[in-house]
Amino acid sequence: MSALSALRELNHEQRHTVLASFLGWTLDAFDYFLFTFVIVAISKEFHADRTDVTLGVLLTLAARPIGALIFGRLADRYGRRPVLMIDVILFSVFELATAFAPSLTMLLIMRFMFGVAMGGEWGIGASLAMETIPPKSRGLVSGLLQSGYPCGFFLGALVNWLLVDHIGWRGLFVVGAIPALLVLYIRRKVPESPAWEATQTQHGRRSLLDAMRGHWKLAIYLMCLMAAFNMFSHGSQDMYHTFEEVNLHLPTGSGAAFMLVALLNLGALVGGIFFGAWSERIGRRRAMIIAALLAIPVVPLWTYGGSFLLLGLGAFLIQVMVQGAWGVVPSHLNELSPDAVRGTLPGFAYQMGNLLAAGTATAQSWLAAQGWGLPLVMSVWIACVALLLALLVWLGPEARGVRFGE
C-alpha cells in the first residue's frame, strides 16, 4: 500500500486527529529542545558548570514517567481528547515559567514540572491517532507522528537561530508558550477515540491492576526497550549543539550551526516516514533492527567528518537511522498494548525508558570532561546502543495489524 493511498483513505475527522497528534508532539519537542540550545548561555548567566545545567535535561526526562502515568490513567478513564487538551496547556505554562526563573535551582524545578506535563502528551496523542485510523494506515501514520519530534527539534533550532541574539534565552521560553493555542484546534476539530468509546461500553472503567493482569512481563520488556530507544535518540541529539559550539567552534546563532541541525532533522523526518511506512510491508521488528544497525557505519561521518559537507552528510544519515527506528515505535507500542490501558502503557513505557536513559546528556558531558572528548563519547555511545537496541527488538514480540476495541 503506497503512502499516498494510505493517507487518501483517511476520512476528514481521521486527518484532523492525525494532524493534532502530530502537532502536539512537534510543539512538545520544540519546547523541550529549546533548553538544549541554551545550555551554554544559562551556565554563563548563573555562573554554573555546564554539567550542572544539563541536570535540566535529566530532570525533564526523569519527570516524564510521572506525567505519563497520571495523564495516561486519566485518558483511559475520561477519554483521550479532554486530557490531551489539559496536558498541552500545562506544558506550555511551565515552559513560560522557565523564562522567569530567578536562579538555576528554580529553573531546574520548572524543567521538572515541564517534564511531568510533557510526559503525558506522547502516549495520549499516539493512542488517540492509532485508535482512530484504519490498521493498514498505522505504519505510515506512526512514522508521521514520530517525525513530529525532529520537526520540533528543527523549529527549536530555527527559533534559536533567528531570535536568541535579539531576545536572549529567556525570550525563547516565552515563545515556547505558543503551543497552548493547539488546544483551540483540538477542541473544534478532533473527536474522541472510537476504540476508547467501544472499550468503555464493553468493560466500563477498570482499575490499573485489573487491566494489567497478565501483562506485567510485557510492560517490563517495553520499558527496557524504550530505555534503549531513548539512549539512542538522546545520545545523538541532546549534546549535539554543545558539540557544535565546543568542538566545531560554531557560535550558537550561526548559520553553519543551524544548517547542521537542519540537515540532522531533515534526515530524521525522512527516516521516520520511510521506515514507519516500510514496517507495514516487512514487519515492525525487522524495520527497527535494520535502521538501528545501519546507524553504526554512519557514526564516523557524523562526528569525525572533517569538512562541513561530510559532517552535514553524517548528521543527515545518522538521524535517518535513529529516527527511522523510532518511526515504528508509535504503532508497535500501541499494537502490543491491551485496549484498557492503551492510554497509559505505551506512554508510561516510553517515559520510563526516558527515566532509565535520563542521564545520557550528563553522562556524555562527564565522560567528555574526563579526557575522552565529546566526539569519541558520542560515537562509542551510539554504536553500543544500536547493538543493544537491535538485540532487544529481536527478542521481543510483534502484533502488526491487530484490531483495537474488539
Image (spheres, helix red, strand yellow):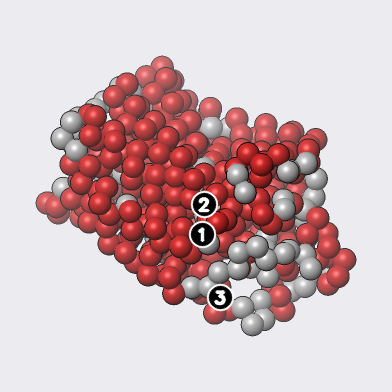
Distance, label 3 to label 1, CA atoms, is: 23 Å
The C terminus: image quadrant: bottom right
Which amino acid does the dot numbered 1 rest on?
A: Ile
Residue at far top of view: 166
Q: Is residue 39 left or right of residue 176?
A: left
Residue in front for this viewpoint, 159 or 324: 324
Sequence-earlier tag: 3 or 1: 3
**Element carrying mark 2:** helix
Q: Can the viewer see residue 278 in this picture?
A: yes
SS category of the residue bearing label 1? helix
Q: Residue at x 63, y 53 (%)?
A: 138
Q: Which residue is mark 3?
A: 218
Which circle marks residue 282 in the picture? 1
**Amino acid marked by disc 2:** Trp
In the image shown, does 315 or 239 lie closer to the viewer? 315
The kind of residue tagged 3 is: Leu
Q: Quadrant of residue 229?
A: bottom left
Residue 113 x/y as whole percent: 54, 49
Q: Which residue is mark 2?
A: 278
Q: Residue at x 61, y 34 (%)?
A: 179
Q: Residue at x 25, y 48 (%)?
A: 299
Residue 162 at x, y = what percent? 42, 20
* Near-viewer residue (150 or 181): 150
Whether tag 1 and tag 2 are in contact, CB under 8 A, the answer is yes
